[in-house]
Image: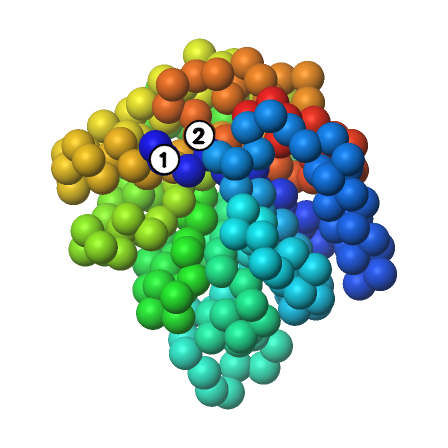
Amino acid sequence: MRKQIVAGNWKMNKNYFEGIELIKEILKLLKDYPPKNFEYTHIIFGTPYIHLFAAAQLIKGDSRLHTAAQNCYTEEKGAYTGEISANMIKSTGTDFVIIGHSERRQYFKESNEMLAKKVNQALSNQLFPIFCCGEVLYEREKDNHHNIVREQLEEGVFHLDKENFKKTVIAYEPVWAIGTGKTATPGQAQEMHQFIRKMIEEKYNKTIAGETSILYGGSCKPSNAKKLFEKEDIDGGLIGGASLKADDFVDIIKAL
Ligand code: PGA
């Protein structure tokens, strides 16, 4: 069975103390109200860098709980003032890293070529990449969304060999649904997830396609999570806004 994952992406929110408090609150809720299928669910806290070490300590010992960085640099080390390497992230006890989020692509001009380097850095430092893809509204309206997502995957992750690809999680996040309150319908999301899985099958094989977790992201919240997660090819969510509230985040976990 492929992993079912709820990953929070805090983006640039929560100072150190607020962030640690949020994780504690979530852990308490999960303990007091254990969701039925917790055994099969993996929960990831995608925090700013400053929280990673302490967050990893808080969740230590529970193999269902993980931390993720929201980015890493393309190079191993050196004179890159202000950047953070995959190796530094790994040394905090973190095991995932989000790569290619649409905000990184849009505001920081990260190209597919740079993202492929980041994916390589992650994997060579034993971090699992959560690789994001997704089209802007204009491309969907032009009916070009499949081509965009195909190109992002071909250039960002399909250079990987089978063993490395198997360590990668894909997140489909239509850019028009991120932070807008406008969610893709379960049907729209399922259609793209199925398309992505088919591409993975063509590139690698049916087994690998069947085992790859593909998460949906974009205004996923307690009120719509269940309908999205019910779809065959949707294996969980990458959650922005709703991951900043303990109750909402736990309700989304319960929906899985
Ligand atoms: P949102 O963000 O849930 O706030 O739409 C999702 C994301 O950007 O990962």
Q: Amino acid at mark 1?
A: Arg
Q: Residue at x 19, y 51 (%)?
A: 162
In front: mark 1 or mark 2? 1
**Taking 20 as reference, is 105 left or right?**
left
Q: Amino acid at mark 2?
A: Asp
Quick one: label 1 or label 2, which is nearer the N terminus? 1
Q: Look at the image and tell me whether residue 65 can be seen.
A: yes
Q: Which mark is residue 2?
A: 1
State how far apart marks 1 and 2 are (Cα). 8 Å
Q: Residue at x 52, y 81 (%)?
A: 80
Find disc 2 in the rendering and name its residue. 235
Q: Which mark is residue 171?
A: none
Residue positioned most to the bottom: 79
Which percent across, then down, holds residue 124? 34, 69
Tell whether label 2 touches label 1 (CB within 8 Å).
Answer: yes
Query: Does the Cβ of the disc 1 residue fall within 8 Å of ligand 1?
Result: no
Quadrant location of the N terminus? top left
Q: Residues within 10 Å of mark 1 (few under 14, many from 20)?
A: few
Residue 244, picture quadrant: top right
Q: Residue at x 74, y 50 (%)?
A: 23
Which percent across, then down, holds residue 28? 78, 43
Q: Secondary structure at mark 2?
A: loop
Foreground pick, 41 / 245? 41
Which percent across, then down, holds residue 228? 52, 19
Which percent across, then down, holds residue 149? 34, 35
Above or below residue 1? Residue 113 is: below
Q: Secondary structure at mark 1?
A: loop
Q: Residue at x 55, y 28 (%)?
A: 37
The tally of labels here is 2
